[in-house]
Image: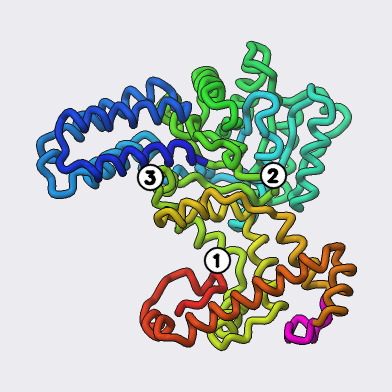
Amino acid sequence: MFENLSDKLQKVFKNLRGEGRLTAQNMETALKEIRVALLEADVHFRTVKQLMESVKEKALGQEVLDSLTPAQQVIKIVRDELLKTLGTHQAKLRLSSDPPSVLMIVGLQGSGKTTSAGKLAKHLAKQGHRPMLVSVDVYRPAARQQLSVVAKDIAIPVYEGTAEEAGKPVDLARSARREATQNNKDILLVDTAGRLHIDEELMVELQQLKDLLNPVEILFVADAMTGQDAVKSADEFHKRLGITGVILTKMDGDARGGAALSIRSVTGQPLKFVGIGEKPDAFEPFHPDRAVSRILGMGDVLSLIEKVEQTIDQKQAEKMQQKLMDNEFSLEDFRDQLKQLRKMGPLESLLGMMPDMGPLGKHMKNAKVDEKELTRIVAIIDSMTPNERVNHMIINGSRRRRIALGSGTSVQDVNGLLKQYTEARKMMKMISGGMLGKKMGKMKLPGFGNLGFPKF
C-alpha cells in the first residue's frame, strides 16, 4: 500500500536535497509536485486542498528557508500534516462496560463485510475477548450461510436463528444479543445487509437495528480498490447513520492509498482496521504514524517486529541464531526457517515494511516474490533423507536425481538450491568469523534476533 505515493514523494524530497539552497521559487515547485502526487494517488481533492494549504503556510516560512537542513524541515512538515490528516493516534475500539458490546458492521454489497466481521472476531478473540457473530442479511442468497462458514473456520460461535426469525433482521439481532448475554459473550458482531448502492430501504433497516441494539461501534467496511467511491459511500453512510469508524479491505492491492488518506478528513471518522489479504489473520489495526512512515519511505519496522513476535518462537529463534554463529545451519534448519517466515504472511508485504536503504533497498521492496518457488524449495528439502539435510556434501548425482523425482522438480532445481545454500553458508562463515563479525558483535540491533538472523 502507498507505493506509488511514496515513490513520488521521495523523488520530490531528493530533488529538494539536491538544491544548493531553498528559495520561494524552488519550494513552490516542490509543493506543486507534492500536490500532484497526492491527487494521482487518488486522495480526495478537498483533503489535498486542506493538506497543501497547511504545508505551504509552514514550508514557505522564513524559518524553513533559512534552516541549515531545509529539505529535512519540509519532510517533517509534510509528515506532521499527514499525521493530522490521518489522525495522530491509533483509534481503538470502544467497548461497553455492560457487555455484550454490540458492533454493527455496515457497508455496500461486495465490500467485504462478512469476511471483515470474521477477521475482526478472530482479532478480538486473540486479545482475550469472547465474541459472537450474527448475520442479519436475509436478502442476499446464502449470506447467512457464508458467515457460518467463516465462523467455523476461525472457531467463533455464530447465532443461527430460528425458522421464524429467518426473514426478520430485527428479530434476529434481538435474539442474538440475548444469546450472547446468556452464553457470557462480551462482544456481539452484527453483519448487516448491503446493497449495490445506498437506498432508503437499507438505511431505514440499519436505523432500526441501531435503535434496537444501541451499538458502541458502527464500522463501515469499504473496498480500498474503489478509491474515491469508498470515501463517498463512507460519507453518505455517516450522514445517514453516524458511523464511528472505517475498515478498509484489500489494502494489500491498493498501491495508491487515496481512500486511506481521505476517509478521516471527509467523514471526520477514523480508519480503525485494514484488511491486507485473504487469510483470516490478514487483518490489523490501522496505525496512522506507521502509515505515514511508509508513505515517506521510512518503512514500518514496528509492525514487522510485532509480526515476528507473534509468529516466531523465541527459543527456536535463539537456537537458530547460535547455529548461524557456529556455521552449523543445515538444510533442515533452512526449511524450518522458510516455514516460519511464510506464517508471517506474503513476503512482498513483509518487504514493504522495510525502510528504503538506497538502490538495493528499493530493489528489494519492489521485488516480486514467487511464493511457488518457496514451495518448491521446501518440497526439495522434504524429499531428502535426514542425513542429506544435515550433511549436504553426501548428495551425489544419483541422490540428486532421486530428490528431483521425489519433489516433482528437476535436477537443475536441486543443483540450484544446493549452490545457493553453499554460498549462503560461506557468507555466514565470513560474517560470524571475520573482523566484521567481531566488530558488529558489539552492536545491539533490537528485533533481528527474533527474525532468526544473528544479532552479530
For residue 241, say whether it is visible: no
Please tell me which of labels 1 and 2 falls first in the chain.
2
- Of circles 1 and 3, the one toward us is 3
Structural crowding at the residue carrying mark 1, measured as other residues with C-alpha within 10 Å and reported as few (<14), some (14–19) or many (≥20): some
390 within the magenta span: yes
- Of circles 3 and 2, the one toward us is 3
The residues tagged by marks 3 and 2 sit, at their Cα atoms, a distance apart of: 27 Å
Contact (Cβ within 8 Å) of mark 1 with mark 3 = no
Q: Dot 2 corresponds to which residue?
A: 278
Q: Toward the viewer: 393 or 191?
A: 393
Residue 1 location in percent, x, y?
52, 41
360 within the magenta span: no
Structural crowding at the residue carrying mark 3, measured as other residues with C-alpha within 10 Å and reported as few (<14), some (14–19) or many (≥20): many
- Residue 66 placement: quadrant: top left
For residue 266, say whether it is visible: yes
Q: Does 406 sit above or below residue 425?
A: above
- Element under label 2? loop
The segment highlighted magenta reads: 384-395
The residues tagged by marks 1 and 2 sit, at their Cα atoms, a distance apart of: 21 Å
Q: How is the image coloured?
A: rainbow
Residue 41 location in percent, x, y?
46, 30
Left-right relation of 167 to 452: right
User: For residue 309, which numbered disc appears in the image?
Assistant: 1
Residue 55 location in percent, x, y?
26, 32
